[in-house]
Image (spheres, rainbow, N blue to C red):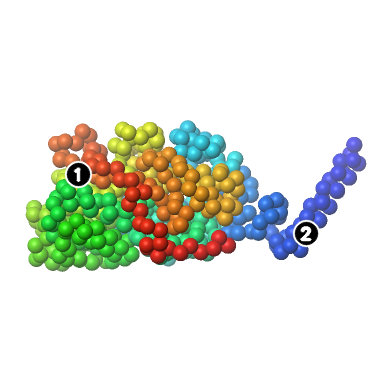
Amino acid sequence: MKDKKTLGQAMQTQVKRRSVLKAGAAGVAGGMLLPGTARVALADDKKPLGAWPAGAEGDSVFVGLTVDLTGPYSAQGAEQKNGYELAAEQINAGAPQVQKISPLLKKGILGKKLVLGSADAETKPNTGVQAATRFIHDNKAMMIAGSTSSAVAIALQKVCNREHTPYFTAISGSNETTGVDCQRYGFRLCYFAYMACKAIAPVVAKELGKDRKAAYLTPDYTYGHTTTQSMKEFTEKEGWKTVTNQVHPLGAKDYSSYLINIANTDADVLVVVAYGADAANAIKQAKQFGLLDKMKIVIPYMSAYLEKEVGADVMQGVYAAQGFWWTMEDHNPVAKDFVEAYEKKYGSKPRDSAMYAYLALVLWADAVERAKSFYPVDVVKALEAGELRDSPVGKVTFRADDHQGIVDFPILRGKKPADMKNPEDFFEVVQVVSGKDVLPPVGLLGCKMGDYV
């Protein structure tokens, strides 16, 4: 019996050797592959791409997170990290919450444990790119996720496209992310400037009047400029007039010169395009200058936790678009599951930063399950297939033409402090906008997808 077993093992070894030599003749670089990768490449008849197949070997798979834990968007980055970690925990457990979104998910992804690694992108493109590159080369990351700054997101999706590694933004408001800077391996789930402004403009025109004069506070980078451009376009169609646009650097602390310029106009609406800590600082200083005694605030793309930063007194009557508000749980069972799980784990209500991070990771895992492979091209094509999935904000999918998420989102109005039912009850949902109805037409923003390989 021992001789037969030895003979069988020898025959298997010769078969494997012949297979590797055949693959080398076909150009699969058989002798150069890492241990175990020849088997995967040969089985699928595919050449190594990105971190595949090395990143798909073993009993776990790695995803790298580039989140802003310092800088003006650090509050959003911290919440994103929470959302990713909650999703990974539920994916690895095969939790019923994620199975409502993706019925294909059992325990892990294709039976492998999902492992996360995170790095602080510092709200800086170079820092984010360096972190993503390390994750792909050193950790064999099969996906990269995370961003708040659109400048960071655009840089990340370019490097991930070059590395043939799927990349998912968390927050990115610039039109350019899935416009002129779209990439075959880049995906944006969240709504963005064009969608937000097209949605909120008719609401504020109806609520505040069609003869308003608007002053803008705009951060000086791609998100700020494209958001202001879109907001001016859609509000001016409603009859509004733009009287000034004050452009400030990202991370500004002192807004006095910009606010003085606004005070010297006859503007009656302050459109705060600034985001994160910038928005909080600008609004607090506008209050101190007395501008808010005569001006209404509109925020076309509102950051998470801004209401806590500036307080309910200031936020009452403010109109804003945001990707998610926790009271949506009253009408959506997936939202209810998400809010309850997040609050149990972190002790607070989630905002859109956490929701988009959570959902993106689950949708990537779902695409891998549908592709039955971690091979990057197969995963990208699965994401492009238009499969609808349930989510905390209703049905979601990605548009194949530009990889923009087709996702609903709410328009909010700040409550009076006396009307708040609890300390987290800052807003009422005025309208849940259909993402499909406010998407730009295909090609309008200049997206031209590159090749898969």
* Residue at image coords 47%, 54%: 400
The percent coordinates of residue 326 (x first, y second) are 31, 39
Amino acid residing under circle 2 = Lys
Task: Tell me if residue 352 can be seen.
Answer: no
In the image: residue 270, left or right of residue 100: left
The percent coordinates of residue 396 (x first, y second) are 42, 44
* Residue at image coords 63%, 54%: 53
* Residue at image coords 91%, 41%: 3
The percent coordinates of residue 224 (x first, y second) are 29, 62
**Crowding near pointer 2: few (<14 within 10 Å), some, many (20+)?**
some
Q: Quadrant of the C terminus?
A: bottom right
Q: Quadrant of the N terminus?
A: top right
Residue at the spot of label 1: 414
Q: Dot 2 lies on which element? A: helix
Mark found first going from the N terminus, 1 or 2: 2
Picture quarter containing residue 337? top left
Of 240 and 275, nearer the camera is: 240
In the image: residue 201, left or right of residue 81: left
CA gap between label 1 and label 2 equals 67 Å
Task: Tell me if residue 58 can be seen.
Answer: yes
Picture quarter containing residue 68? bottom left
Of 172 and 91, nearer the camera is: 172
* Residue at image coords 46%, 57%: 401
The percent coordinates of residue 162 (x first, y second) are 52, 64
Amino acid residing under circle 1 = Gly
Residue at the spot of label 2: 22
Q: Dot 1 lies on which element? A: strand
